Image (tube, helix red, strand yellow):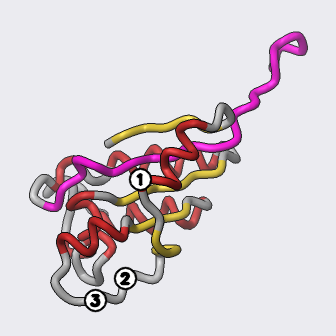
Amino acid sequence: MPDPDATPNTVEGLALLLWSADTDAPHRLATPFSYAAAAAAMDLRVEIYFTARSVELLLPGVAASLRASPRHSKTVLDAMRESVAQGAVLWACSDALAALVTAPQVLIPECSGRGGAVQFIARAADLRWRTLVF
């Protein structure tokens, strides 16, 4: 039973920065989306910022071809979709896309658009938000 004298939770959201989440290390790729889905299920706003090589996960076919483990039945795309189904919003860093992708690419439909350093730093500076870096 909740403590009636406890200070109410004033956290509004959770921003995740995928920095070292790399397609060459798929064993690291499911965890951020599990945390995102859990936070969204707790009624927190969740934003996931894909930067560095993690933006490759937003290209069609990439996340669908990866599994965190041979024993894991879900693809990384399945994990991403579960977090989006719970309410997470996915943002692609324009600079990372420009640096890593040679031609303009259509991103997976689960991606909400472009967002990068300024948006993430605004969340990190907002006392009502928490951040995690993967």
The disc label shown at residue 107, or none: 2
Residue 130, quarter of the rendered image: top right
The N terminus is located in which quarter?
top right
In the picture, measured across the screen, residue 70 lies left or right of residue 122, that is left
- The answer, for residue 71, to whether it is visible in the render is no
Reading the chain from its start, which is encountered first: label 3 or label 1?
1
In the picture, measured across the screen, residue 104 lies left or right of residue 8, that is left
Residue lying at the far left in this picture: please name it: 24
Q: Residue at x 29, y 87 (%)?
A: 105
Location of residue 81 with respect to 25 vertically, above or below: below
Classify 10 Å Cα crowding around label 3: few (below 14), some (14-19), many (20 and above): few
Q: Residue at x 22, y 75 (%)?
A: 62
- The residue stretch that appears in magenta: 1-23
In the picture, measured across the screen, residue 26 lies left or right of residue 76, that is left
Q: Secondary structure at mark 1?
A: helix
Disc 1: which residue: 33
Classify 10 Å Cα crowding around label 1: few (below 14), some (14-19), many (20 and above): many
Instruction: Identify which residue, 75 or 134, lies in the foreground.
Output: 134
Q: CA distance from mark 3 to mark 2?
A: 9 Å
Disc 3: which residue: 104
Q: Amino acid at mark 1?
A: Phe
Q: Position of residue 59 (x, y in %)?
A: 28, 79
Q: Amino acid at mark 2?
A: Leu
Q: CA distance from mark 1 to mark 2?
A: 18 Å
Instruction: Identify which residue, 3 or 18, lies in the foreground.
Output: 18
